[in-house]
Image (cartoon, rainbow, N blue to C red):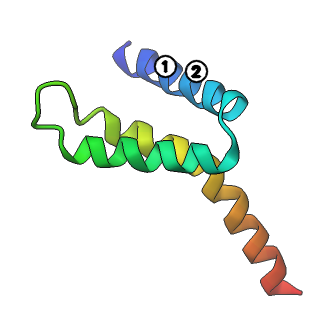
Amino acid sequence: MVRSRTRRARRRVQVWASRRLPPGGRFAAGVLLMIGGLLGFLPILGFWMLPLGIAIAALDVVPLWRRLRGQGRR
């Protein structure tokens, strides 16, 4: 039950980020969340930020990898 709720929340944030943030901003927000996740021992920041940052940054990285793979085959 907790996993499904977590997946729904992650998916909701990904959809929000893909609609509201520009492509470069999504990657920057993802990197900032990952950096905040590394500082998870601090009171406000948490380790929950690390997987969320990866999920948001992946919105920009996946199309880039696809584009690079497509050009490499030609």
Residue 35, compared with residue 42, is above or below; it is: below
| Number of other residues with Cα within 10 Å of mark 2, as a class: few under 14, some 14 to 19, many 20 or more | few
Q: Of the numbered discs in the image, which one, if any, rests on residue 12?
A: 2
- Classify residue 45 as left or right of residue 29: left
Residue 41 x %, y %: 10, 37
Q: CA distance from mark 1 to mark 2?
A: 5 Å
**In terms of depth relative to the viewer, which is nearer, 30 or 1?**
30
Residue 65 x %, y %: 67, 67
At mark 1, the secondary structure is helix
| Number of other residues with Cα within 10 Å of mark 1, as a class: few under 14, some 14 to 19, many 20 or more | few
Count of numbered badges drawn on the protein:
2
Residue 37 x %, y %: 27, 42
Q: Amino acid at mark 1?
A: Ala
Quadrant in the rendering for residue 6: top left
At mark 2, the secondary structure is helix
Residue at x 49% of width, y 19% of height: 9
Quadrant the C terminus occupies: bottom right
The reply to whether dot 1 and dot 2 touch (C-beta < 8 Å) is yes
Residue 31 x %, y %: 43, 50
Residue at x 53% of width, y 48% of height: 57
Q: Amino acid at mark 2?
A: Arg
Look at mark 1 in the image and give the residue it sits on: 9
- Classify residue 22 as left or right of residue 8: right
Residue 30, compared with residue 16, is above or below; it is: below
